[in-house]
Image: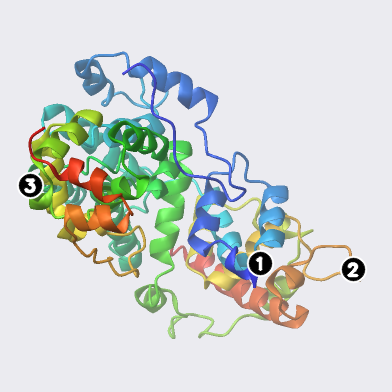
């Protein structure tokens, strides 16, 4: 049923409730009426939101926990290249697709890390990198990390990371129904 | 960089979230500052005009996603994690549960932050909208884990050597049985708020929900079909609600009397 599929997840509702500008009786009752399935969670979060934090001096264990988190983060930064596509909003990706004269689906293939980096012609790679203000090395490094679980880790811990099948650049063009002559142009190494 | 990038998360109604005007203004002011100034300001306490609101700190850490680690990033990252910790239950030798919630929440936050760098996580936008409240949601999420109260119950169960021998006196029974929206404040209004809230947080989630609704002036039941009652909100019989409320009250009175919180 339509209504059922549109029902947001409990986590979404609770996060939205948490950032409401005001937490008063009216807001609470509005959420309880709108999302009756999550009434217990909403009302108990309401209690949590009303609690004052007990600020205490940091213990050695606290300092170590922060230090350990930083070390893990720093290692992740040094070893995993940034996902250069993730931070580009969709309208900008459309523009890039237009500039490169390719369907948005091809760009989506890059964004989803579906493309095997070694199959991308250098000329196209250079054009794509320039279009998103990156170096070719940054783009290939980001794509090469497609199998890293961190890149596909979800906000929800119970959700399995998705495995993205890799395809060649040419296959991606075929799947996006790029006409053969255009395809040949895009696949050409030198003009 | 002259303007902070907009948030991408959409509200339940489908509108894009925007930062509050105060946070937006502060962010526009802060992003013009050199990194050295931001680092100095990370040590400034709340109340000082140079204090960086946590929502802004969250923005700076996320905005740095594509840079390599260095002293600047280490400073703002550490400051942000301390802000998270400030909102988590303090370590407590007598309550293992609180310590578990503290470190699991911090770990979960740090992990999400690391993943956000690789692939933008809209769920982290909430921290740029209302930071403290989003951390409250984070710690509640950790508290909600199955078996979370296993250790807590061990310390809070009635003590067999207690003068009451695990039984409740008729006075407590009476007090519990008469609690409703009208007299919630009468029973608990004068009590130290932090201790009361802490005691409530150790109850089963259904009981916390019932007490919260009572506190928000919702009646358990009503003859008027237009009144939104606790019974309606939870889809449970009035009798069940009263039973749960009574159990919650007995436990609360016991905890507060023993000064276990």
Do the residues indicated by labels 1 and 3 lie within the same chain of the protein?
A: yes
**Residue A28 placement (x, y as % from top left):** 67, 53
Q: Residue furthest right?
A: B224
Relative height, residue B236 to residue B57 (above, below): below
Mark 2 falls on what kind of element? loop
Q: Is residue B48 visible?
A: no
Q: Is residue A168 visible?
A: yes
**Residue B245 placement (x, y as % from top left):** 66, 73
Relative height, residue B97 to residue B173 (above, below): above
Give the mark, 1 or 3, whose residue is nearer the N terminus.
Answer: 1
Q: Which residue is mark 3?
A: A79
Labels 1, 3: front one = 1
Left or right: where B173 falls relative to A83: right
Do the residues indicated by labels 3 and 2 lie within the same chain of the protein?
A: no
Quarter of the image that includes the C terminus of chain B: bottom left
Which residue is drawn at the image coordinates 52% and 33% (left, top)?
B18
Asked if disc 2 and disc 1 are in contact, CB closer than 8 Å, the reply is no
- In terms of image quadrants, where is residue B44? top left
Residue situated in front as seen by the camera: B173 or A188? A188
Mark 3 falls on what kind of element? helix
Q: Which residue is mark 1?
A: A3
User: Badge 1: how crowded within 10 Å, few (<14), some, or many (20+)?
Assistant: few
Relative height, residue B118 to residue A191 (above, below): below
Which residue is drawn at the image coordinates 33% and 52% (left, top)?
B90
Left or right: where B139 falls relative to A110: right
Q: Which residue is mark 2?
A: B225
């Amino acid at each position: 049923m339509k209504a059922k599929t549109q029902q947001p997840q409990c986590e979404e509702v609770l996060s939205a409730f948490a950032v409401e500008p005001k937490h008063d009786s009216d807001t609470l009752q509005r959420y309880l009426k709108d999302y009756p399935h999550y009434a217990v969670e909403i009302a108990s979060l309401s209690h949590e939101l009303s609690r004052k934090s007990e600020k205490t001096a940091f213990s050695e264990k606290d300092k170590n926990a922060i230090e350990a988190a930083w070390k893990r983060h720093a290692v992740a930064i040094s070893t995993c290249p940034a996902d250069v596509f993730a931070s580009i909003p969709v309208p900008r990706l459309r523009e890039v697709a237009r500039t490169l004269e390719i369907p948005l689906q091809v760009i989506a293939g890059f964004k989803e890390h579906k493309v095997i980096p070694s199959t991308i012609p250098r000329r196209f790679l250079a054009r794509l990198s320039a279009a998103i203000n990156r170096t070719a090395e940054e783009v290939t490094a980001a794509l090469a990390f497609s199998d890293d679980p961190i890149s596909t880790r979800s906000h929800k811990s119970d959700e399995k990371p998705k495995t993205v099948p890799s395809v060649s650049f040419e296959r991606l063009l075929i799947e996006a129904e790029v006409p053969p002559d255009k395809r040949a142009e895009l696949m050409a190494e030198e003009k | 960089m002259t303007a902070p990038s907009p948030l991408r998360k959409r509200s339940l109604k489908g509108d894009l979230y925007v930062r509050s005007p105060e946070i937006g203004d502060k962010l526009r002011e802060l992003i013009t500052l050199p990194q050295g100034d931001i680092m100095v300001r990370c040590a400034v306490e709340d109340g000082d005009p140079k204090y960086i609101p946590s929502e802004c700190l969250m923005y700076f850490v996320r905005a740095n996603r594509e840079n390599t680690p260095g002293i600047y990033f280490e400073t703002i990252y550490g400051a942000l994690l301390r802000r998270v910790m400030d909102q988590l239950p303090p370590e407590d030798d007598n309550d293992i549960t609180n310590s578990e919630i503290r470190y699991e929440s911090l770990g979960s936050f740090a992990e999400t932050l690391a993943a956000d760098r690789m692939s933008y996580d809209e769920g982290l936008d909430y921290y740029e909208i209302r930071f403290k409240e989003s951390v409250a949601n984070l710690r509640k999420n950790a508290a909600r884990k199955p078996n979370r109260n296993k250790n807590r119950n061990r310390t809070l169960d009635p003590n067999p050597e207690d003068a009451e021998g695990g039984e409740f006196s008729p006075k407590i029974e009476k007090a519990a049985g008469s609690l409703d929206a009208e007299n919630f404040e009468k029973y608990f209004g004068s009590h130290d708020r932090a201790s009361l809230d802490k005691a409530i947080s150790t109850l089963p989630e259904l009981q916390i929900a019932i007490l919260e609704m009572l506190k928000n002036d919702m009646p358990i039941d009503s003859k008027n079909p237009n009144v939104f009652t606790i019974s309606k909100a939870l889809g449970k019989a009035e009798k069940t609600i009263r039973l749960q409320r009574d159990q919650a009250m007995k436990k609360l009175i016991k905890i507060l009397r023993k000064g276990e919180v």
